Amino acid sequence: MKKILIALLVVAVAVASCIALIGCKDEEKKDEFIVATNAAFPPFEYKEGNKFVGVDMELAQKIADKLGKTLVVKDMEFDSVILSVASGESHVGMAGMTITDKRKETVDFCNPYYNASQMLIVPENDTTFDGLTTAAQIEEKLKSLSGVTIGVQRGTTGNYYVKGDADWGFDGFANVTCKEYDNGGLAVKDIQNGQCNYVVIDEMPAKQIVETSNIVNSSKKVKVISVPLTEEEYAFAVAKGNTELKNQINSIMEELKKDGTFQAILDKYFAAE
Ligand code: ARG
């Protein structure tokens, strides 16, 4: 009898500590603010050594602080960010992400915080787009070209803009080949290597990537054609129906705008301009 009692006790203790452990794990998860991003998109998110930096990453830290949680950044392919948020693996996607109707089918967006547009990167000595000042003119020119390859980051609005996609509201360019890369930096490198002709990517990353690429390979310089091709708004994405977090982030962002923090972060990262 005594033996049975002891055995029961041992089992009970084991079960209890298991439950306690699981509880702890849950507790830990609750204290984290998990952000999904693709840290290859300067000045919004990129890495300096092991550190995540950029506008979105600083905002992520501020938001985590205000929520009283520990920031955890998950770096992944850009086209995984939405899935990570939708599946609940991450709490929020912060990735210079454009609000689109297509994405709204999968996630909810917080209020927009930045206006952006796609731009074209070309070799410095390329004169194809000289004198063109509107998106319509550039698009007309792109439609008239053949045998041209344009690089884009996979899953981005630039990708759909070049490839053409009815769901995304883009016609595309019949005779242009769209080449998809893991990130914009690799695409621009391929212009320099002669593997693609042009790159389409968001304006600020275009400028920063061009600057770095011209330092890394100064014999094959590239430049940005400063004509906005699209009109886009960036926003953070939360899981569909997570109104609580969406509202929290919206009001924290309001505070950060009011007290000047948001502008200071923009100034810090756009100073190179
Ligand atoms: N704004 C574009 C989009 O939403 C590109 C974003 C890419 N972001 C990144 N972190 N790589 O599709």
Image (cartoon, rainbow, N blue to C red):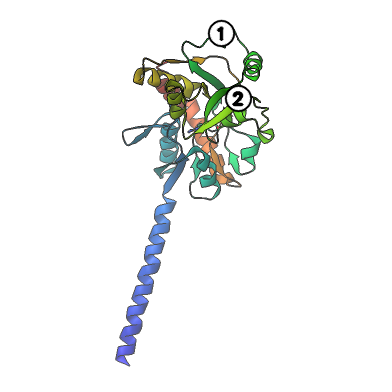
Q: Nearer the viewer, residue 255 or 173?
A: 173
Image location (x, y in percent) of residue 44 = 45, 29
**Secondary element type, mark 2:** strand
Q: Residues within 10 Å of mark 2 (few under 14, many from 20)?
A: some
Query: Does residue 218 sit above or below 250 in this rendering?
Result: above
Identify the residue at the far bottom of this view. 1
Image location (x, y in percent) of residue 180 = 52, 33
Image location (x, y in percent) of residue 61 = 41, 36
**Secondary element type, mark 1:** loop
- Which of the labelled discs sits on residue 218, or is there none? none
* Cβ at disc 1 under 8 Å from ligand 1: no
Q: Is residue 88 left or right of residue 62?
A: right
Q: Nearer the viewer, residue 216 or 135?
A: 216
Q: Residues within 10 Å of mark 1 (few under 14, many from 20)?
A: few
Of the 4 image quadrants, the one containing the N terminus is bottom left
Of the 4 image quadrants, the one containing the C terminus is top left
Say if residue 112 shows up in the picture. no
Image location (x, y in percent) of residue 70 = 39, 44
The type of residue carrying mark 1 is Asp
Query: Does residue 233 sit above or below 129 in this rendering?
Result: below
Q: CA distance from mark 1 to mark 2?
A: 19 Å
The answer to whether mark 1 and mark 2 are in CB contact below 8 A is: no
Q: Nearer the viewer, residue 35 or 219?
A: 219
Say if residue 114 shows up in the picture. yes
Query: Does residue 9 sit above or below 244 in this rendering?
Result: below
Q: Along the polypeptide, which appears first: circle 1 or circle 2?
A: 1
Q: In the rendered image, which quarter is residue 19 located in?
A: bottom left
Residue underneath mark 1: 130
Identify the residue at the far top of this view. 131
The type of residue carrying mark 2 is Val
- Which of the labelled discs sits on residue 176, or is there none? 2
Q: Nearer the viewer, residue 70 or 230?
A: 230
